[in-house]
Image (cartoon, grey):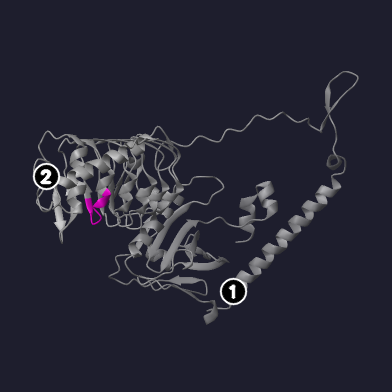
Amino acid sequence: MAVYCWSTPGEIMATIEILILLVLSSYAAALTTDGLALLALKSAVSADPTGALDAWLDFDDNPCSWTGVTCSLGRVSALALPDRELAGYLPSELSLLSELQILSLPGNRLSGPLPAALAVFRGLTDLDLSRNNLSGAIPTEIGQLTSLAHLDLSSNLLAGSLPSSIAALPHLSGVLNLSYNHLSGPIPLAFGNIPVDVSLDLRQNNLSGEIPQVAPLLSQGPTAFSGNPDLCGFPLKNPCPAAKQDPKIPQPNPSLNMNPNDGTLRPVASEKQKSPVGTVAILAVVLLIALIAMFVLQWQLRKRRSAGPCKESSHEKSSSPGFSTTITGGSVTGERREGHASEVYAAVDEGFGLELEELLRASAYVVGKSRSGIVYKVVVGREGSAVAVRRLSENDDGDGSSGGDEWRRRRAFETEAIAIGRVKHPNVVRLLAYYYAPDERLLIYEYIPNVSLHAALHGNLTALRTAFR
């Protein structure tokens, strides 16, 4: 007589499931493998108050006529039993449904963990197990469902961290709903790779830390992250606290010296205080260099204005299909073309009311070039008010190719421009407006004039601007 021993509960459960399949196969020899897998699910269901599985009979030739089952070419392609109040668990034998494309069991009372064996459903496009009592962590193997477009695991008892593998699903395009669970930890930076057209929902969890500041997450809006008390950062109104600095032992001040006679502190004169001549000489050299640079710049500007129209090599032409913009000899001329709905010109600052046609006809001067683009000083109107316009190069925002991804590039550009416009800091130039076309991107900033170091140190900006007008 043979004696069998099992070392782990998992081996016991695996043996019991094998015995169940053997018993079922003895009564259902004519059933296909898909039918046996569904009978394993019926055996795992402990309560069926609506009788949804009563028609699942073991002596049928195939399961294609069973309730909630859809077949294609004789194989089970969909299993949908929503709101049937089924109680039980999901058996690993479901992995035998190799041609399954839709698994929809929302609104039931299924419990236990998500079986990692679901990763074999390489053709699965829709997985909806919402409104159940599933527990445990989300298996990282879900990232192997390469055809998955719709994933809804909301309103369960799932815990643990967000697996980064979900964000790498290549065909995810519909819904990614993980709300109303007990998920914890930070949002992985990999979630910034989720396509912008995916509806992300992470509400009512225990997530913490700062939301990664990337366009796909910022475009979701605050509703997607609400109900997580320890989550902070835009688009939530809950700012992240500043990093706490460790207290440090104060260092002795070398400029103070203890008087041995009365025990009082007295300042000690430093080398620079004893000899201010060196400091004055250094400042004089710096101011002289700044003045010389300013005179050279003024001379170059006057020479460029008097030279008239520039040669072809100095022309900068835009390739935007909506506007034919040519910057020549210090002027911008624009011609509107109709029928291009992909163009966007929007003001970020509420006080900015400059029209696009007025901007294109204003005088412009190149003030800087870099790998990311060219910066122009644009003088508008008779009063001579100026703005700075940065024309982004093609490499700074995609390859400029047209196609189905054009609207995604425009949405990403607008999202980043709006995020830049929200930055308010005295050391950051304000973004006033932006313009987007399929092959043209402009950022309009507040113009900050260059001044000398002497004027910056002594605050005499008004006199300096008057002297060089």
Could you tell me the amino acid type at mark 1? Arg
Q: Main secondary structure of the magenta part?
A: loop
Q: In this view, does 209 lie above or below 67?
A: above
User: Which quadrant would the N terminus be assigned to in this image?
Assistant: top left
Spatial CA span between label 2 and label 1: 87 Å
Q: What residue type is labelled 2?
A: Trp
Looking at the image, do the residues carrying marks 2 and 1 touch, with CB atoms under 8 Å apart?
A: no
Q: Specify the label residue 304 is tagged with.
A: 1
**Residue found at the far top of this picture:** 262
**At x 40% / y 61%, what residue is drawn?**
435
Q: Mark 2 highlights which residue?
A: 56
Give the foreground label among 2 and 1: 2
Please state, as top left, top right, bottom left or bottom right, where the C terminus lies in the image: bottom right
Magenta segment range? 95-102
Q: Helix or strand or loop: what does disc 2 sit on? A: loop
- Where residue 311 sits, quadrant-wise, is bottom right
Q: At x 40% / y 45%, what residue is drawn?
A: 163
Q: Earlier in the sequence, mark 2 or mark 1?
A: 2
Query: Which of the 4 image quarters holds residue 243?
Result: top right
Depth check: 411 or 449 in front?
A: 411
Give the quarter of the image for residue 247: top right
